[in-house]
Image (cartoon, rainbow, N blue to C red):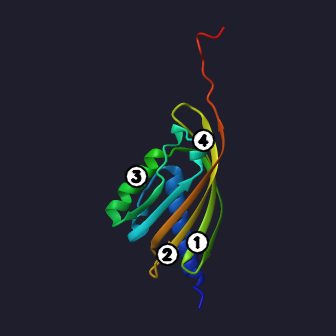
């Protein structure tokens, strides 16, 4: 039968912890939420532009334990620096959850990038994460202004 509201609320808090960690750049202790063998799958549309600023980690990664999950998350957070983000809702049903987040980040050259990322979470029977799938979509890139001495 369905899960209790306590189970759903606990999963909702795990999703919030993960999303806050990824978007704020502070992993904290979120690696503990991952089950051994958890799979993280990341896709985005940055290839359409193929800009080096995105520095993406596309692909599927199997995290064999908490140490590997910490290492993976630290690398993911090192590559992403968000100026702002807004969670746009979380849905929890049985052993799955979904959430959407709109964000703005700044690349190394100062350009502003806006986008949305959808997250799908799969949970084990004991409430740990067995999988996360993300699909990010870049909406806009606003190039940084440059002061060029050769322009008069």
Regarding mark 3 in the picture, which secondary structure is present there?
helix
Query: Is disc 3 surrounded by few (<14), some (14 to 19) or many (20+) residues within 10 Å?
Result: some
The crowd level at tag 4 (other Cα within 10 Å; few <14, some 14-19, many 20+) is few
Q: Which residue is mark 3?
A: 74
* Local secondary structure at mark 4: loop
Tell which of 47 and 138 is nearer to you. 47
Dot 1 falls on a residue whose secondary structure is: strand
Rounded to the nearest angstrom, the CA distance separating label 3 from label 2 is 22 Å
- Earlier in the chain: of badge 3 and badge 4, it is 4
Mark 4–mark 2 Cα distance, whole angstroms, equals 34 Å
Nearer mark to the viewer, of 4 and 1: 4
Mark sitting on residue 43? none
| Residue 55 x/y as whole percent | 48, 43
Determine the CA span between mark 4 and mark 1: 30 Å
Which residue does the image show at 64% across and 44% down from the upper left?
Answer: 114
Marks 4,1: beta carbons within 8 A: no
Q: Give the percent coordinates (x, y) of residue 118.
A: 61, 60
Proximity of marks 2 and 1: CB atoms separated by less than 8 Å:
yes
Instruction: Choose the circle earlier in sequence order: 2 or 1.
Output: 1
Say which element carries label 2: strand
Would you place residue 70 above or below residue 25 in this image? below
Query: Where does label 2 land, which residue?
Result: 123
Q: Which residue is mark 4?
A: 49
> Which labelled disc corresponds to residue 97?
1
Q: Which residue is found at the position 41% from the left and 69% from the top? A: 38
Q: Nearer the viewer, residue 99 or 8?
A: 99
Contact flag, marks 1 and 3 (Cβ < 8 Å) = no
Q: Is residue 89 above or below residue 116?
A: below
Q: Position of residue 111 (x, y in %)?
A: 60, 34
Residue 110, image x, y percentages: 57, 32
């Amino acid at each position: 039968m369905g899960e209790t509201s306590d189970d759903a609320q606990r999963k909702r808090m795990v999703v919030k912890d993960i999303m806050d960690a990824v978007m704020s750049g502070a992993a904290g202790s979120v690696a503990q939420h991952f089950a051994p063998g958890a799979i993280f799958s990341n896709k985005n549309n940055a290839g359409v532009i193929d800009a080096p600023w995105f520095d993406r980690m596309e692909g599927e990664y199997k995290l064999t334990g908490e140490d590997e999950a910490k290492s993976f998350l630290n690398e993911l957070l090192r590559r992403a620096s968000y100026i702002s983000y807004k969670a746009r809702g979380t849905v929890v049903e049985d052993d799955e959850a979904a959430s959407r987040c709109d964000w703005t980040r700044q690349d190394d050259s100062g350009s502003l990038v806006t986008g949305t990322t959808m997250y799908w979470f799969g949970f084990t029977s004991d409430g740990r994460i067995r999988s996360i799938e993300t699909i990010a979509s870049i909406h806009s890139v606003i190039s940084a202004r440059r002061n060029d001495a050769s322009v008069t």
